Image (cartoon, rainbow, N blue to C red):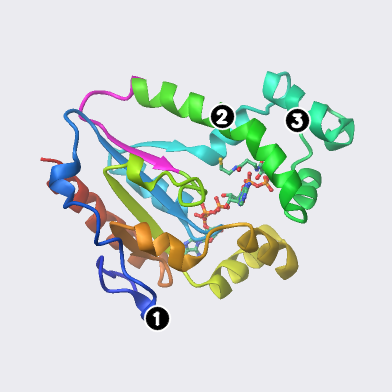
Amino acid sequence: MAGTLAGEQPGGAPGPDRTRPPLRRRWDTGGVRVGLTGGVASGKSTVSAVLTELGAVVIDSDVLAREVVARGTPGLEQVVAAFGAGVLTPEGDLDRAAVGAIVFADEAQRRVLESIVHPLVRARSAELEAVAGPGALVVHDIPLLVEGGMAPAFDAVVVVDVPPELQVERMVRDRGWSAEEARARIAAQATREQRLAVATHVIDNTGTREQLRERVEQVHAELLAAAS
Ligand SMILES: CC(C)(COP(=O)(O)OP(=O)(O)OC[C@H]1O[C@@H](n2cnc3c(N)ncnc32)[C@H](O)[C@@H]1O)[C@@H](O)C(=O)NCCC(=O)NCCS
Ligand SMILES: Nc1ncnc2c1ncn2[C@@H]1O[C@H](COP(=O)(O)OP(=O)(O)OP(=O)(O)O)[C@@H](O)[C@H]1O
């Protein structure tokens, strides 16, 4: 159901957070800060790419989470200290598949990894935001925005919404993961309902890529209008 407006939820899911003040009163002076989230493989990167084309400055937490543990970084040293040299490839990079297998099967281990990576990602995000031009529409693509209780920090929260079955289908189709691996990632995240509960804007991504683009253009225009 592409073109879902805030308040018109598919499948009877709860609507966006109505306790938030209207957008117009939430903007600080200067730029507009938007949080973009959604479950794994919901389509956040696809949405981010369109927003970038439209002129937004997108700061992608997944990209930063890779940078802060790149070969030779203090972040990678910390991960090795916590998980052992077995999580490195022969070339000395983080073996992401190996770490994923550990942390998505064991919540305590996931918390350990997050306690290393998340502070580094937050610091880098703040640096990047500081160099975005005045008046920029800054979009933070944060998979774990809801889990981290970060919704109140943003002027608007855009949620990319798909049902879990479609997440699994896309992960299996496009990433070669087993359905079991896909479900383990979903289980490590907030529920669809929890995300929708904090949304100011919902982007339904159960339709075609063209329908997704149209909806992103619509939300982008709404965000700019609310900020002006
Ligand atoms: C476990 C790791 C090495 C697996 O790497 P991999 O290349 O397979 O996945 P990638 O990093 O591209 O993440 C893909 C998606 O998995 C989901 N995901 C990643 N980390 C987590 C997590 N800690 N909890 C729940 N879901 C997660 C997100 O939806 C993310 O968009 C990696 O995801 C990681 O370092 N995770 C911890 C850092 C983190 O929380 N990142 C999320 C954004 S800051
Ligand atoms: N409307 C759509 N129709 C079909 N496939 C789509 C659609 N939107 C996205 N996809 C595909 O689904 C997969 C997941 O999309 P994308 O990578 O944008 O999700 P994501 O939320 O950024 O994922 P992650 O949580 O791993 O960062 C990709 O392979 C993407 O090309």
The residue depicted at 68 percent of the width and 24 percent of the height is: 75
The residue depicted at 72 percent of the width and 54 percent of the height is: 104
State the mark number for residue 79. Answer: 3
Question: Within 10 Å of the Cα at label 1, are there few (<14), some (14-19), or many (20+) other Cα atoms?
Answer: few
> In the rendered structure, which disc, 2 or 3, sits on the residue that comes first in sequence?
3
Q: Which residue position is annotated with label 2?
A: 119
The residue depicted at 27 percent of the width and 74 percent of the height is: 8
Residue 102 x/y as whole percent: 80, 49
The residue depicted at 58 percent of the width and 34 percent of the height is: 118
State the mark number for residue 68. Answer: none
Residue 69 magenta-drawn?
A: no
Left or right of 167? Residue 44 is left
Residue 183 x/y as whole percent: 67, 66
Please state, as top left, top right, bottom left or bottom right, where the C terminus lies in the image.
top left
Determine contact: label 1, label 2, CB under 8 Å: no
Q: Nearer the viewer, residue 23 or 94?
A: 23
The region drawn magenta spans 131-141
SS at badge 3: helix
The answer for how far apart the CA atoms under marks 2 and 3 are is 13 Å
Determine contact: label 2, label 3, CB under 8 Å: no
Which residue type carries mark 2?
Pro
Residue 140 magenta-drawn?
A: yes
Left or right of 27? Residue 67 is right
Residue 153 x/y as whole percent: 34, 40
Which residue type carries mark 1?
Gly
Q: Which residue position is annotated with label 1?
A: 11
Determine contact: label 1, label 3, CB under 8 Å: no
SS at badge 2: helix
